[in-house]
Image (spheres, rainbow, N blue to C red):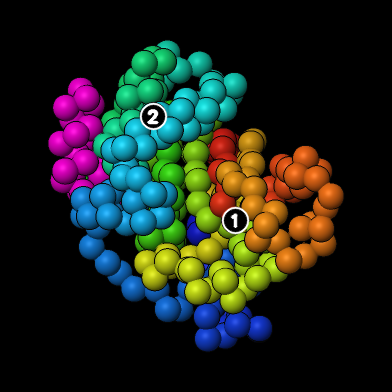
Amino acid sequence: MQKELEFNKQPHPRLPEEYDLCSRTGLHFYKRAKMREYTENYFLEEFKNQYKKTYYEDEPNLRKLAQKRLSILMSFLNPVEKSLLEVGCAAGFFLDEAAKLGFQVKGIEISQKEVEYARNLGHSVDGISFLEYQPKETFDVLAAFFVIEHFQNQELVLTKIRDLIKKDGYLFLALPSLYGPSYLTNPDDWFSNHPGDHFVDYSPSSLKSVLEMLGFQICFREPMSFHPQRDRGWRGRFPTKYFYRVLARWSCYGDTMQILAKKII
């Protein structure tokens, strides 16, 4: 029997103006977050401001990242005749790489320009919000990369995600992490750069707790980035980046993380 997801929110004991804290899971709810509209402007101006190139100019690197993620996924299941849904698929680069391997892919994307681009690649993409999506099927894999933190109602979104995945299917997530150098050793920098449309912040442990409540078991996790230069704690004093990376990978220590979880209930 699947456990129902229910958070118990209380003011954060140290940061009550910034966060509410779920006493059951450790999930942090960012109190200053506000809803915003997502248009093609994100993929042009905002993406370029962050990565020094537009989303489309970065296509080769985004496809390489997709290939790395798919190699992780394929170590757990055979893609042939397996269905995959990506929530927030943007222009469809991940979908395109997955389709090449044999996945039967579908996507959801709210920015209409990116919907058109993904459709021109030959993929089925619905141009609606995930909350409006009314599926008639379940999937072997659901992927959502830097998406779920943008939703205010996590119970609704995560329960919907759970119900879209077949038993023994997989959930592949990437999202910011509290268990990293910025929040743990330089919180002023963390909050000064905190996106205003991120309603929640996870750590590896809080994500594990939430997913277990939903009937998932984590089978892979790793930090997506390594920033020893940001680290003002003891890890940042390691003499070489090699040891920093070894420890970070072992403990999933980083400002961003990605996880793969299997639905076991």
Q: Amino acid at mark 1?
A: Asp
Comparing 125 with 47, the one in front is: 47
Q: CA distance from mark 2 to mark 1?
A: 23 Å
Examine the structure image and report whether residue 139 is included in the region drawn in magenta.
no
* Residue 56 shows in this picture: yes
Q: How many marks?
A: 2
Q: Position of residue 182 (x, y in %)?
A: 62, 64
Q: Residue at x 65, y 61 (%)?
A: 230
Q: Position of residue 36 (x, y in %)?
A: 27, 67
- Tell me if residue 187 comes above or below residue 67 in the rendering: below
Residue 109 colored in magenta in the image: yes
Q: Residue at x 42, y 66 (%)?
A: 195
The mark nearer the N terminus, 2 or 1, is 2
Residue beneath disc 2: 60
> What residue did someone put label 1 on?
255
- Residue 220: x and y in percent read 64, 36
Magenta stretch, residue numbers: 107-131
Q: Quadrant of residue 112?
A: top left
Residue 117 versus residue 209 in the image, above or below? above
Instruction: Please tell me whether residue 149 is drawn above or below residue 63 in the rendered image.
Output: below
Residue at left offset 64%, top offset 52%: 227
Say which amino acid is labelled 2. Pro
- Asked which secondary structure carries label 1, the reply is loop
Q: Answer whether residue 73 is visible to the viewer in this image.
A: no
Q: Position of residue 99 (x, y in %)?
A: 34, 20
Compared to residue 96, the image places residue 176 above or below, namely below
Neighbor class of circle 2 (other Cα within 10 Å; few <14, some 14-19, many 20+) is few
